[in-house]
Image (tube, rainbow, N blue to C red):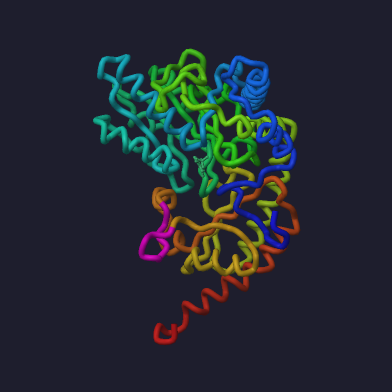
Protein backbone atom coordinates (compact mmCIF):
# COMPACT_ATOMS: atom_id res chain seq x y z
CA UNK A 1 0.00 0.00 0.00
CA UNK A 2 1.12 3.60 -0.57
CA UNK A 3 3.36 4.53 2.36
CA UNK A 4 1.94 7.19 4.68
CA UNK A 5 -1.63 6.49 3.63
CA UNK A 6 -3.86 5.15 6.38
CA UNK A 7 -6.38 2.93 4.64
CA UNK A 8 -9.56 2.48 6.67
CA UNK A 9 -12.01 1.69 3.89
CA UNK A 10 -11.80 -2.10 3.60
CA UNK A 11 -15.56 -2.41 3.06
CA UNK A 12 -15.11 -0.51 -0.22
CA UNK A 13 -12.27 -2.75 -1.34
CA UNK A 14 -9.25 -4.43 0.18
CA UNK A 15 -5.61 -4.76 -0.88
CA UNK A 16 -4.51 -7.95 -2.61
CA UNK A 17 -2.36 -9.91 -0.18
CA UNK A 18 1.15 -10.88 -1.34
CA UNK A 19 0.37 -14.59 -0.93
CA UNK A 20 -2.68 -14.14 -3.15
CA UNK A 21 -0.74 -12.27 -5.82
CA UNK A 22 1.99 -14.90 -5.79
CA UNK A 23 -0.55 -17.69 -6.27
CA UNK A 24 -2.09 -15.82 -9.20
CA UNK A 25 1.04 -14.83 -11.13
CA UNK A 26 1.69 -18.16 -12.95
CA UNK A 27 -1.83 -17.93 -14.37
CA UNK A 28 -1.15 -14.49 -15.79
CA UNK A 29 2.04 -15.76 -17.43
CA UNK A 30 2.83 -19.29 -18.61
CA UNK A 31 -0.30 -21.06 -17.37
CA UNK A 32 -2.64 -19.09 -19.59
CA UNK A 33 -4.57 -21.95 -21.21
CA UNK A 34 -8.35 -22.08 -21.31
CA UNK A 35 -9.42 -24.45 -18.52
CA UNK A 36 -12.01 -25.92 -20.90
CA UNK A 37 -9.33 -27.10 -23.35
CA UNK A 38 -8.69 -30.84 -23.51
CA UNK A 39 -4.87 -30.75 -23.78
CA UNK A 40 -2.50 -30.93 -20.82
CA UNK A 41 -1.94 -27.17 -20.61
CA UNK A 42 -5.70 -26.67 -20.26
CA UNK A 43 -5.93 -29.42 -17.69
CA UNK A 44 -3.38 -27.61 -15.51
CA UNK A 45 -5.54 -24.49 -15.36
CA UNK A 46 -8.65 -26.65 -14.86
CA UNK A 47 -6.96 -28.28 -11.87
CA UNK A 48 -6.15 -24.84 -10.42
CA UNK A 49 -9.77 -23.69 -10.83
CA UNK A 50 -11.05 -26.85 -9.14
CA UNK A 51 -8.57 -26.50 -6.26
CA UNK A 52 -9.81 -22.95 -5.72
CA UNK A 53 -13.41 -24.16 -5.79
CA UNK A 54 -12.58 -26.64 -3.05
CA UNK A 55 -11.06 -23.84 -0.90
CA UNK A 56 -14.16 -21.66 -1.26
CA UNK A 57 -16.40 -24.65 -0.44
CA UNK A 58 -14.31 -25.45 2.65
CA UNK A 59 -14.43 -21.88 3.96
CA UNK A 60 -18.23 -21.88 3.68
CA UNK A 61 -18.57 -25.47 4.96
CA UNK A 62 -20.47 -26.37 1.79
CA UNK A 63 -21.27 -30.05 1.16
CA UNK A 64 -18.85 -30.04 -1.75
CA UNK A 65 -17.13 -27.93 -4.41
CA UNK A 66 -20.02 -28.66 -6.81
CA UNK A 67 -22.05 -26.14 -4.77
CA UNK A 68 -19.75 -23.25 -5.78
CA UNK A 69 -20.16 -21.27 -9.01
CA UNK A 70 -17.57 -18.65 -9.94
CA UNK A 71 -18.80 -15.27 -11.17
CA UNK A 72 -17.26 -11.90 -12.06
CA UNK A 73 -18.09 -10.14 -8.76
CA UNK A 74 -20.38 -9.99 -5.74
CA UNK A 75 -22.96 -8.04 -7.73
CA UNK A 76 -23.18 -10.76 -10.36
CA UNK A 77 -23.53 -13.41 -7.65
CA UNK A 78 -26.42 -11.42 -6.14
CA UNK A 79 -28.13 -10.97 -9.51
CA UNK A 80 -27.70 -14.64 -10.44
CA UNK A 81 -29.17 -15.67 -7.09
CA UNK A 82 -32.16 -13.32 -7.02
CA UNK A 83 -33.05 -13.14 -10.71
CA UNK A 84 -32.06 -16.73 -11.42
CA UNK A 85 -34.14 -18.10 -8.53
CA UNK A 86 -37.14 -15.87 -9.31
CA UNK A 87 -37.24 -16.80 -12.99
CA UNK A 88 -36.75 -20.49 -12.26
CA UNK A 89 -39.56 -20.52 -9.65
CA UNK A 90 -41.89 -18.65 -12.00
CA UNK A 91 -41.29 -21.17 -14.77
CA UNK A 92 -41.52 -24.25 -12.53
CA UNK A 93 -44.79 -23.01 -10.96
CA UNK A 94 -46.28 -22.08 -14.35
CA UNK A 95 -46.50 -18.42 -13.44
CA UNK A 96 -47.79 -18.78 -9.88
CA UNK A 97 -44.60 -17.84 -8.01
CA UNK A 98 -44.27 -14.22 -9.03
CA UNK A 99 -43.34 -12.46 -5.79
CA UNK A 100 -39.92 -11.55 -4.39
CA UNK A 101 -38.85 -10.15 -1.01
CA UNK A 102 -35.77 -8.26 0.13
CA UNK A 103 -34.86 -6.04 3.07
CA UNK A 104 -34.76 -2.24 3.05
CA UNK A 105 -30.98 -2.15 3.55
CA UNK A 106 -29.78 -4.43 0.76
CA UNK A 107 -26.88 -3.43 -1.45
CA UNK A 108 -27.90 -1.95 -4.79
CA UNK A 109 -26.91 -5.21 -6.49
CA UNK A 110 -29.95 -6.85 -4.86
CA UNK A 111 -32.20 -3.77 -4.73
CA UNK A 112 -31.85 -3.06 -8.44
CA UNK A 113 -32.17 -6.74 -9.36
CA UNK A 114 -35.51 -6.75 -7.52
CA UNK A 115 -36.53 -3.55 -9.27
CA UNK A 116 -35.67 -5.17 -12.61
CA UNK A 117 -37.85 -8.16 -11.74
CA UNK A 118 -40.72 -5.76 -10.97
CA UNK A 119 -40.30 -4.22 -14.41
CA UNK A 120 -40.65 -7.76 -15.79
CA UNK A 121 -43.99 -8.25 -14.00
CA UNK A 122 -42.95 -9.70 -10.63
CA UNK A 123 -44.39 -8.25 -7.44
CA UNK A 124 -41.94 -7.20 -4.73
CA UNK A 125 -42.08 -6.50 -1.00
CA UNK A 126 -39.39 -4.63 0.93
CA UNK A 127 -39.11 -5.65 4.58
CA UNK A 128 -38.35 -2.75 6.97
CA UNK A 129 -35.58 -2.75 9.58
CA UNK A 130 -35.39 -1.47 13.15
CA UNK A 131 -33.22 1.40 14.38
CA UNK A 132 -30.15 -0.86 14.33
CA UNK A 133 -30.76 -2.10 10.80
CA UNK A 134 -32.12 -5.50 11.89
CA UNK A 135 -34.99 -7.19 10.11
CA UNK A 136 -37.56 -8.57 12.53
CA UNK A 137 -38.76 -12.13 11.97
CA UNK A 138 -42.40 -11.05 12.30
CA UNK A 139 -41.95 -8.41 9.60
CA UNK A 140 -40.48 -11.06 7.31
CA UNK A 141 -43.40 -13.43 8.01
CA UNK A 142 -45.87 -10.66 7.17
CA UNK A 143 -44.15 -10.10 3.81
CA UNK A 144 -44.33 -13.75 2.70
CA UNK A 145 -47.07 -15.05 0.41
CA UNK A 146 -47.85 -18.42 -1.15
CA UNK A 147 -46.57 -16.85 -4.38
CA UNK A 148 -43.15 -15.86 -2.93
CA UNK A 149 -40.36 -17.25 -5.08
CA UNK A 150 -37.23 -15.96 -3.31
CA UNK A 151 -36.24 -13.94 -0.24
CA UNK A 152 -32.93 -12.06 -0.11
CA UNK A 153 -31.63 -10.63 3.18
CA UNK A 154 -28.00 -9.69 3.59
CA UNK A 155 -25.80 -11.29 6.24
CA UNK A 156 -23.96 -8.08 7.13
CA UNK A 157 -24.67 -4.55 6.01
CA UNK A 158 -21.86 -2.81 4.15
CA UNK A 159 -22.48 0.64 5.69
CA UNK A 160 -23.32 0.08 9.33
CA UNK A 161 -22.08 -3.49 9.70
CA UNK A 162 -25.22 -4.86 11.35
CA UNK A 163 -25.45 -8.66 11.23
CA UNK A 164 -28.84 -10.23 10.51
CA UNK A 165 -30.14 -13.41 12.21
CA UNK A 166 -29.98 -15.34 8.97
CA UNK A 167 -30.58 -18.80 10.44
CA UNK A 168 -33.95 -17.71 11.79
CA UNK A 169 -34.95 -16.25 8.42
CA UNK A 170 -33.82 -19.24 6.38
CA UNK A 171 -35.85 -21.55 8.64
CA UNK A 172 -38.96 -19.41 8.21
CA UNK A 173 -38.54 -19.65 4.45
CA UNK A 174 -37.72 -23.35 4.43
CA UNK A 175 -40.92 -24.13 6.40
CA UNK A 176 -42.84 -22.40 3.62
CA UNK A 177 -40.84 -23.92 0.77
CA UNK A 178 -39.47 -20.52 -0.26
CA UNK A 179 -35.90 -20.08 -1.54
CA UNK A 180 -33.56 -18.00 0.63
CA UNK A 181 -30.50 -16.02 -0.45
CA UNK A 182 -28.06 -14.04 1.64
CA UNK A 183 -25.49 -11.52 0.46
CA UNK A 184 -22.42 -12.36 2.55
CA UNK A 185 -20.04 -10.12 0.60
CA UNK A 186 -19.10 -8.18 3.74
CA UNK A 187 -19.20 -10.98 6.29
CA UNK A 188 -17.08 -13.67 4.63
CA UNK A 189 -13.59 -13.61 6.14
CA UNK A 190 -14.70 -11.31 9.01
CA UNK A 191 -17.03 -13.60 10.94
CA UNK A 192 -17.68 -17.35 10.57
CA UNK A 193 -19.90 -17.98 7.55
CA UNK A 194 -21.16 -21.56 7.55
CA UNK A 195 -23.86 -22.38 5.03
CA UNK A 196 -25.01 -25.38 7.09
CA UNK A 197 -25.66 -23.43 10.27
CA UNK A 198 -27.04 -20.45 8.34
CA UNK A 199 -29.33 -22.85 6.47
CA UNK A 200 -29.30 -20.76 3.27
CA UNK A 201 -29.99 -21.97 -0.27
CA UNK A 202 -27.84 -19.31 -1.92
CA UNK A 203 -24.97 -17.16 -0.62
CA UNK A 204 -22.90 -14.52 -2.45
CA UNK A 205 -19.30 -13.48 -1.85
CA UNK A 206 -16.79 -11.24 -3.59
CA UNK A 207 -13.02 -11.54 -4.06
CA UNK A 208 -12.00 -7.93 -3.57
CA UNK A 209 -13.52 -7.66 -0.09
CA UNK A 210 -11.28 -10.47 1.19
CA UNK A 211 -7.88 -9.49 -0.21
CA UNK A 212 -8.29 -11.21 -3.58
CA UNK A 213 -8.51 -9.09 -6.75
CA UNK A 214 -11.51 -7.27 -8.16
CA UNK A 215 -13.42 -9.03 -10.92
CA UNK A 216 -14.08 -12.37 -9.26
CA UNK A 217 -16.88 -13.60 -7.03
CA UNK A 218 -18.68 -16.78 -6.14
CA UNK A 219 -22.18 -18.01 -5.47
CA UNK A 220 -22.95 -20.93 -3.18
CA UNK A 221 -25.89 -22.89 -4.64
CA UNK A 222 -27.15 -25.65 -2.35
CA UNK A 223 -27.42 -29.05 -4.04
CA UNK A 224 -30.86 -29.46 -5.54
CA UNK A 225 -31.50 -25.69 -5.86
CA UNK A 226 -32.09 -24.73 -9.47
CA UNK A 227 -31.48 -21.34 -11.04
CA UNK A 228 -32.23 -19.95 -14.43
CA UNK A 229 -28.82 -18.72 -15.67
CA UNK A 230 -28.39 -15.00 -16.27
CA UNK A 231 -25.29 -15.37 -18.46
CA UNK A 232 -26.01 -18.41 -20.58
CA UNK A 233 -23.21 -20.76 -21.63
CA UNK A 234 -21.76 -24.15 -20.85
CA UNK A 235 -19.16 -23.22 -18.27
CA UNK A 236 -19.73 -23.82 -14.56
CA UNK A 237 -21.98 -26.78 -15.41
CA UNK A 238 -24.29 -24.56 -17.49
CA UNK A 239 -24.94 -22.30 -14.51
CA UNK A 240 -22.78 -19.36 -15.65
CA UNK A 241 -21.39 -18.89 -19.14
CA UNK A 242 -18.01 -17.27 -19.87
CA UNK A 243 -14.42 -18.50 -19.89
CA UNK A 244 -13.27 -18.60 -16.29
CA UNK A 245 -11.07 -15.81 -14.90
CA UNK A 246 -8.46 -18.35 -13.88
CA UNK A 247 -6.00 -16.02 -12.15
CA UNK A 248 -8.81 -14.25 -10.26
CA UNK A 249 -10.35 -17.57 -9.23
CA UNK A 250 -6.98 -18.87 -8.02
CA UNK A 251 -6.57 -15.63 -6.03
CA UNK A 252 -10.02 -16.03 -4.51
CA UNK A 253 -9.23 -19.63 -3.57
CA UNK A 254 -5.99 -18.58 -1.87
CA UNK A 255 -7.75 -15.77 0.01
CA UNK A 256 -10.41 -18.23 1.24
CA UNK A 257 -7.70 -20.61 2.43
CA UNK A 258 -6.02 -17.77 4.33
CA UNK A 259 -9.36 -16.74 5.85
CA UNK A 260 -9.90 -20.28 7.10
CA UNK A 261 -6.40 -20.47 8.57
CA UNK A 262 -6.69 -17.09 10.30
CA UNK A 263 -9.97 -17.43 12.18
CA UNK A 264 -8.67 -15.34 15.08
CA UNK A 265 -8.36 -12.28 12.82
CA UNK A 266 -11.87 -11.14 13.81
CA UNK A 267 -10.88 -10.70 17.46
CA UNK A 268 -8.05 -8.35 16.51
CA UNK A 269 -10.35 -6.33 14.24
CA UNK A 270 -12.83 -6.03 17.09
CA UNK A 271 -10.12 -4.73 19.44
CA UNK A 272 -9.15 -2.05 16.92
CA UNK A 273 -12.78 -1.17 16.23
CA UNK A 274 -13.42 -0.66 19.94
CA UNK A 275 -10.44 1.69 20.13
CA UNK A 276 -11.86 3.69 17.21
CA UNK A 277 -15.29 3.90 18.77
CA UNK A 278 -14.00 4.95 22.17
CA UNK A 279 -11.91 7.67 20.53
CA UNK A 280 -14.81 8.93 18.39
CA UNK A 281 -17.17 9.07 21.36
CA UNK A 282 -14.75 11.37 23.20
CA UNK A 283 -15.72 14.05 20.67
CA UNK A 284 -18.81 16.09 21.58
CA UNK A 285 -22.10 15.10 19.93
CA UNK A 286 -20.90 11.84 18.43
CA UNK A 287 -22.70 8.52 18.18
CA UNK A 288 -22.00 5.03 16.86
CA UNK A 289 -24.62 3.65 14.46
CA UNK A 290 -25.66 0.06 13.76
CA UNK A 291 -26.32 -2.73 16.22
CA UNK A 292 -24.42 -2.41 19.54
CA UNK A 293 -23.33 -6.08 19.60
CA UNK A 294 -24.53 -7.86 16.44
CA UNK A 295 -22.15 -6.07 14.13
CA UNK A 296 -19.12 -6.84 11.98
CA UNK A 297 -15.90 -6.53 14.02
CA UNK A 298 -14.44 -4.58 11.10
CA UNK A 299 -17.10 -1.91 10.63
CA UNK A 300 -17.62 1.28 12.57
CA UNK A 301 -20.16 3.84 11.39
CA UNK A 302 -20.04 7.03 13.45
CA UNK A 303 -21.97 10.28 13.19
CA UNK A 304 -21.01 13.75 14.34
CA UNK A 305 -24.15 15.80 14.85
CA UNK A 306 -24.82 18.60 12.41
CA UNK A 307 -21.75 18.25 10.21
CA UNK A 308 -21.41 17.08 6.62
CA UNK A 309 -19.87 13.58 6.52
CA UNK A 310 -18.57 14.17 2.99
CA UNK A 311 -16.65 17.24 4.19
CA UNK A 312 -15.13 15.16 6.96
CA UNK A 313 -14.01 12.53 4.46
CA UNK A 314 -12.24 15.27 2.47
CA UNK A 315 -10.65 16.76 5.60
CA UNK A 316 -9.31 13.32 6.62
CA UNK A 317 -8.10 12.64 3.08
CA UNK A 318 -5.96 15.79 3.33
CA UNK A 319 -4.29 14.08 6.30
CA UNK A 320 -3.73 10.92 4.24
CA UNK A 321 -6.56 8.96 5.84
CA UNK A 322 -9.08 7.05 3.71
CA UNK A 323 -12.57 6.55 5.11
CA UNK A 324 -15.95 6.90 3.42
CA UNK A 325 -19.30 8.61 3.85
CA UNK A 326 -22.69 7.78 2.37
CA UNK A 327 -23.28 8.34 -1.31
CA UNK A 328 -23.51 12.03 -2.29
CA UNK A 329 -26.44 13.11 -4.39
CA UNK A 330 -26.10 15.00 -7.63
CA UNK A 331 -26.53 18.44 -6.03
CA UNK A 332 -23.29 17.88 -4.12
CA UNK A 333 -25.07 17.96 -0.77
CA UNK A 334 -24.73 14.70 1.12
CA UNK A 335 -28.02 12.94 1.51
CA UNK A 336 -28.45 10.08 3.96
CA UNK A 337 -28.17 6.72 2.25
CA UNK A 338 -31.13 4.36 1.89
CA UNK A 339 -29.62 2.33 4.74
CA UNK A 340 -29.56 5.19 7.25
CA UNK A 341 -33.01 6.34 6.09
CA UNK A 342 -34.33 2.82 6.67
CA UNK A 343 -33.05 2.88 10.27
CA UNK A 344 -34.96 6.13 10.83
CA UNK A 345 -31.83 8.00 11.93
CA UNK A 346 -32.48 11.74 12.19
CA UNK A 347 -30.98 13.42 9.08
CA UNK A 348 -29.03 15.81 11.32
CA UNK A 349 -27.09 12.76 12.52
CA UNK A 350 -27.28 10.77 9.32
CA UNK A 351 -25.64 13.50 7.19
CA UNK A 352 -22.71 13.63 9.58
CA UNK A 353 -21.90 9.93 9.26
CA UNK A 354 -18.65 8.30 8.19
CA UNK A 355 -17.75 4.65 7.84
CA UNK A 356 -14.41 3.44 9.11
CA UNK A 357 -13.72 -0.13 8.06
CA UNK A 358 -10.82 -2.36 9.03
CA UNK A 359 -9.23 -5.39 7.43
CA UNK A 360 -6.06 -7.31 6.81
CA UNK A 361 -3.06 -5.10 7.61
CA UNK A 362 -4.99 -2.69 9.89
CA UNK A 363 -2.92 -1.91 12.96
CA UNK A 364 -2.81 0.28 16.06
CA UNK A 365 -0.70 2.91 14.30
CA UNK A 366 -3.55 3.41 11.76
CA UNK A 367 -6.01 3.91 14.59
CA UNK A 368 -3.59 6.34 16.28
CA UNK A 369 -3.27 8.44 13.12
CA UNK A 370 -7.03 8.46 12.60
CA UNK A 371 -7.85 9.39 16.17
CA UNK A 372 -5.08 11.99 16.14
CA UNK A 373 -6.53 13.78 13.10
CA UNK A 374 -10.26 13.33 13.77
CA UNK A 375 -11.02 15.87 16.56
CA UNK A 376 -9.34 18.71 14.69
CA UNK A 377 -11.07 17.77 11.41
CA UNK A 378 -14.51 17.68 13.08
CA UNK A 379 -13.87 20.95 14.90
CA UNK A 380 -12.71 22.68 11.71
CA UNK A 381 -15.91 21.69 9.90
CA UNK A 382 -18.06 22.73 12.85
CA UNK A 383 -16.33 26.12 12.99
CA UNK A 384 -16.75 26.66 9.25
CA UNK A 385 -20.45 25.87 9.58
CA UNK A 386 -20.77 28.37 12.40
CA UNK A 387 -19.42 31.23 10.22
CA UNK A 388 -22.02 33.57 8.74
CA UNK A 389 -22.94 32.53 5.23
CA UNK A 390 -21.66 35.88 3.86
CA UNK A 391 -18.05 34.85 4.50
CA UNK A 392 -18.32 31.25 3.31
N1 LIG B 1 -22.97 -6.70 -1.65
C1 LIG B 1 -22.43 -5.97 -0.69
C2 LIG B 1 -22.98 -6.05 0.69
C3 LIG B 1 -21.36 -5.13 -0.96
O1 LIG B 1 -20.83 -4.38 0.01
C4 LIG B 1 -20.85 -5.08 -2.29
C5 LIG B 1 -19.76 -4.15 -2.64
O2 LIG B 1 -19.56 -3.14 -2.01
C6 LIG B 1 -21.44 -5.90 -3.26
C7 LIG B 1 -22.50 -6.70 -2.91
C8 LIG B 1 -20.95 -5.90 -4.65
O3 LIG B 1 -19.72 -6.57 -4.76
P1 LIG B 1 -18.80 -6.34 -6.04
O4 LIG B 1 -18.14 -5.02 -5.86
O5 LIG B 1 -17.84 -7.49 -6.03
O6 LIG B 1 -19.70 -6.38 -7.22
Q: Residue 382 at what x, y percent from top left?
A: 52, 75
Q: In this view, does 68 lie to the left or right of 270?
A: left
Which of the pair 64/172 is nearer the observer? 64
Vertical placement of residue 149 versus 210, above or below: above
Q: Residue 201 at what x, y percent from top left?
A: 48, 22
Residue at 47% x, 37% y is 75
Magenta residues?
A: 328-337
Quadrant holding the C terminus: bottom left
Residue at 69% x, 46% y is 269
Q: Does the magenta portion include 336?
A: yes
Q: Residue 56 at what x, y percent from top left?
A: 63, 26
The number of numbered badges drawn on the structure is 0
Which of the pair 40/330 is nearer the observer? 40
Q: Residue 179 at what x, y percent from top left?
A: 41, 22
The quadrant in which residue 151 appears is: top left
The quadrant in which residue 376 appears is: bottom right
Vertical placement of residue 145 versus 293, above or below: above
- Secondary structure mainly formed by the magenta segment: loop
Residue at 61% x, 59% y is 322
Residue at 62% x, 46% y is 14
Q: Does the magenta portion include 46?
A: no
Vertical placement of residue 311 versus 187, above or below: below
Vertical placement of residue 257 versus 365, above or below: above
Amino acid sequence: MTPDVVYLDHNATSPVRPEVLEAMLPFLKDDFANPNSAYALGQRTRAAVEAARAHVARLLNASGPDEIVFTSCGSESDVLAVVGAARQALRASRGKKNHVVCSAIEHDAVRLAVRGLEADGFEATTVPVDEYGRVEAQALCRALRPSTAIVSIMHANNEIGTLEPIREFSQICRERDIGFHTDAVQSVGKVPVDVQSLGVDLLSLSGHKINAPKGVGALFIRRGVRLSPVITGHQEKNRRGGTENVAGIVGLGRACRLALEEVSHGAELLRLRRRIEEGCLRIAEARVNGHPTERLPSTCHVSFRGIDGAALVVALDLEGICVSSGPACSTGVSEPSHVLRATGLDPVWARGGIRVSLGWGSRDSDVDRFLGALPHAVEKIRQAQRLPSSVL
